[in-house]
Image (cartoon, rainbow, N blue to C red):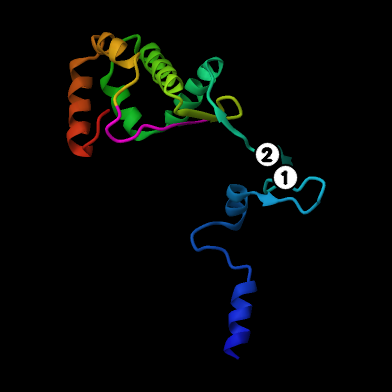
Amino acid sequence: MRLQRAALRATSQERPTGVHPVREQAMMGERSKSTSDSHLVRNHNGTIMAPLAVESLEYIEIPRAVQTTQDAMRNDSMAHYFNDVDTVPGRKWRGRASLVMNYTDEILRHRAWTINHGEAVLTLRLPGDSQGPLLPLFTPLLKTTDTEELTKARAIMLTQSGCAL
């Protein structure tokens, strides 16, 4: 009897708690059953998607990576907090310039990867790493446009989170 219950549990189609079945399938993808397209992935609608390839981020892909990053941060509560206290007219330009320099530094250090030429971006910075060559040169210039309120807000976040912003 115990063996039957164990076999039943092993073959059951139970989903992890807290994850909707459609969402789980969309997150994980479903491997194609056909032998001719076994390297492809099907999404929750059954549409065959191309396999995802992680590649090194290239300089030409920086504009799309910057846009992807800004789109991802659009609804972030901390970004809203900083935007509320940053009233300088060129703040969007300053943010783009900072991201461009950051991605350029990470490419120089071979620590930036992408999926689909900037649609998804990953950078790696190890604890204790120094910054790349561009950020130390341009960060002081960009900080001259910071408002007093933004400087205070960053200091508060730094002390509360224990990390550098």
- Spot occupied by residue 100 in the image (x, y as percentages of width and height): 43, 16
**Front residue of this view, candidates 139 and 125:** 125
Q: Classify 10 Å Cα crowding around label 2: few (below 14), some (14-19), many (20 and above).
A: few
Residue 158, by quadrant, is top left
Instruction: From this view, report whether residue 28 is shown above or below residue 71.
Output: below
Magenta residue check for 128: yes
The answer to whether 144 appears left or right of 97 in the picture is: left
Q: Which residues are magenta?
A: 120-129
Main SS category, magenta section: loop
Please identify the quadrant where the N terminus is shown: bottom right
Query: Looking at the image, which residue is at 25% across and 21% down?
Result: 85
> The disc labelled 2 sits on which kind of residue?
Pro
Query: Looking at the image, which residue is at 62% across and 48% down?
Result: 26
Instruction: From this view, report whether residue 117 is shown above or below residue 26.
Output: above
Query: Looking at the image, which residue is at 63% across and 79% down?
Result: 7
- Cα–Cα span, label 1 and label 2: 7 Å
Residue under numbered circle 2: 51
SS label for mark 1: loop
Residue under numbered circle 1: 39
In the picture, the disc for residue 89 is none
Label 1–label 2 contact, CB within 8 A:
yes
> The disc labelled 1 sits on which kind of residue?
His
Residue 103, by quadrant, is top left
Magenta residue check for 7: no
Q: Earlier in the sequence, mark 1 or mark 2?
A: 1
**Front residue of this view, candidates 38 and 90:** 38
The answer to whether 30 appears left or right of 91 in the picture is: right
Query: Looking at the image, which residue is at 39% across and 13% down?
Result: 97
Residue furthest toward the bottom?
A: 1
Instruction: From this view, report whether residue 36 is shown above or below residue 101.
Output: below
Q: Classify 10 Å Cα crowding around label 1: few (below 14), some (14-19), many (20 and above).
A: few
SS label for mark 2: loop
